[in-house]
Image (cartoon, grey):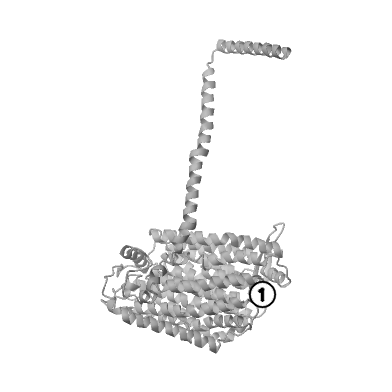
Amino acid sequence: MTTTTLAVLVPLLPFLGAAAGLLLGRTAPGFVRPLAVLPTLAAAVLAVVVAARQGGGRPIDAATQLTPTGSVPIDLALHLDGFAVLVAVLVGLVATCVQIYSTAYLKNDARYPSYAALVSLFTSAMLLVVYSGDLMVLLVGWEIMGICSYFLVGHYWETPEARAASLKAFLVTKLGDVPFLIGLFALAADTGTFRITGILAAVTNGGLDHPTLIALLLLAGVAGKSAQFPLHTWLPDAMAGPTPVSALIHAATMVAAGIYFVARLLPVFAASGAALVVLAVMAAVTMIGSGLAALAQDDIKRVLAYSTIGQLGYMSGALAVGDRGAAVFHLLSHGAFKAVLFLAAGVVIHAAGTNSLAAMSRMGGLTKRIPDAYWTMTVALLALAAIPPFAGFFSKEAVLVAAEHTAFGDRDVAPAAAGWTILVAGLAAAVLTAAYATRLWLLAFRGRGPEAPDHGRQPVAMTSVLWVLAVPTIAFGLAAGVLTDWFDGHSLAPSLTTAVLSTGVGLVGGLVTYGAWRHTTALADRPPVGAVAAHPDAEPALVEAEAMASHTAAYGTIAGALDPSDPGRLLLGPLHRHAVTGFHLDALYSVLFVRPVGAAARLVRFLDREVVDTYVRGSGSTARGLGTLVRRAQTGNVQTYLGALLAGTLVLAIAAVVFANVYAGA
């Protein structure tokens, strides 16, 4: 088979698996799990083959006209460059691991067939985004991911948290998609094509008439999809979905789509220095704000959610300084270690019977019960904190090196202001990242108290994939030196200055957090913590759903806990109560947007019911009254009809005479 044919099969196989799974889910449930795992696994293998054949060389392009439009054509096109083939491998790997993990995590879930089909469809949509060479076809995958995330995040629809989270994720991302769509049309109007190669050629030849406007419109969609300030608020709440969904959507697929889109079209954004500065500021605020919020969260998955937002900020920062190689490098390494963190968190929640770090800190023996999750999560947290030699160190260093070169004028792709913004914010975020990673590890695995509830040995399907994903978490950074051809051919090696600075501040953040934990651990006996829903015989998905419900019941919120032994509370001080709510952005948006829109909706409903409907009902009543009068005149008596006819004729004759005399006198 040709490389193009194999590339077509990569997104097609999960799509066919999704369709078959939906069709056979009720009639032949025994086929559901093979149809979930095998097509995705085959797609991952083919993605590796495509990457090997592409080899980081010249991009492979193929296209056929999808439909005539009369103006700008829409093509079913493939564009396979080094970035595309590597991201496809990541998506295939993570999706396969998630499908295998889910077979045990949702073992007895009645909705597993639809869940597995949606995961396969979601995977197919992301692979379509990755391989697509036409922006309209890319938009199809972009929107399919959005609707799939709505259903997957709301999988536990019985809980109010899941229902609200799925709706919020859908609405916030759609809010960004509206200007994104306008930006796509404006870009096509300027360049005359939706093909990525044609757009890049037009930009090179100066064919972009409104670069700043187009770039800012597109950034709105990117901010929504990739959870960047100010449209990031949906991501922490989306943790109400099953843990494997979090690993898929929030590690390697949906949230990475916006970053990948900007990397694909970076020359469009680089044509406007103002747009790059806006992107840099957006990335800096995202990195710092999410780091502070992560340090205050009690739900282990919400810590990881805010961590994801911050790491996406690093990727946006790399793009803001014009280095898409560093951005995609961090996207790939982050996808691997964040998938480990989420999937290991699922094991931890099942073993502890709670998602509350405050409750875990009062348990003993959790490390012995789940050694696989403990060791792989430790490795992934070290990668998250950018400690060498793990993958996160090398990819984060690539971002900081790019920012350093831009700040000092060694690169002129972006303004120096963007470089300084990302460099300073990146170093500050490194401190916060190390701090919340250390806090999570200490509270989850160094608890003191009664033994954790015994759920037995964790299923092999859940623990084996942790070790599979731990391999790139450890080795990908070391192997990046041989992959330079896939990253535009330039080196991604760290520099001594930024390596020492970022590692040093990271170690300081970790050590300070450890000291705060030692200081506060004496308070771990009070107050009593009740957010535990331990059912030794229950499947992991049920334990997670009940853990979320018990957390809200115990603390009044899914985000925080009134725990004086939390080192994050000591480190943040008075800032803690603001950070735990995400700095009240949801409340602010409620005042600025939700309430006015709700008031406008109520006004429209009033006008519709009391004004418009009044006229409609009045016209109906008038017609009905006239009909009643006319009906009374229809007696069926011929003499009555003749009498009425003669009377009418007489009236008309008299009226004619009167009018004739009036006009004659005039």
Position in image of residue 146 (x %, y %): 52, 62
Q: Dot 1: what SS?
A: strand
Position in image of residue 471 (x %, y %): 47, 82
The residue depicted at 70 percent of the width and 67 percent of the height is 208
Q: In the picture, residue 344 is in which quadrant?
A: bottom left
Q: Amino acid at mark 1?
A: Ile
Locate the C terminus and report the quarter of the image it occupies: top right
Q: In the picture, residue 181 is in which quadrant?
A: bottom right
Locate the N terminus and report the quarter of the image it occupies: bottom right
Q: In the picture, residue 108 is in which quadrant?
A: bottom left
Q: Residues within 10 Å of mark 1 (few under 14, many from 20)?
A: few
Give the total number of marks visible in the rendering: 1
Please state if 430 lies on the left or on the right of 194 as rendered.
Answer: left
- Judging by the rendered image, the residue that carries numbered circle 1 is 60
Position in image of residue 233 (x %, y %): 47, 65
The residue depicted at 36 percent of the width and 71 percent of the height is 349
Q: Is residue 387 visible?
A: no
Q: Is residue 525 above or below residue 183?
A: below
The front one of 635 and 199 is 199
Please state if 617 lies on the left or on the right of 62 as rendered.
Answer: left
Q: Is residue 420 visible?
A: yes
The front one of 47 and 38 is 47
Position in image of residue 22 (x %, y %): 48, 60
The residue depicted at 46 percent of the width and 84 percent of the height is 505
Q: Is residue 608 above or below residue 15?
A: above
Please state if 54 lies on the left or on the right of 555 as rendered.
Answer: right
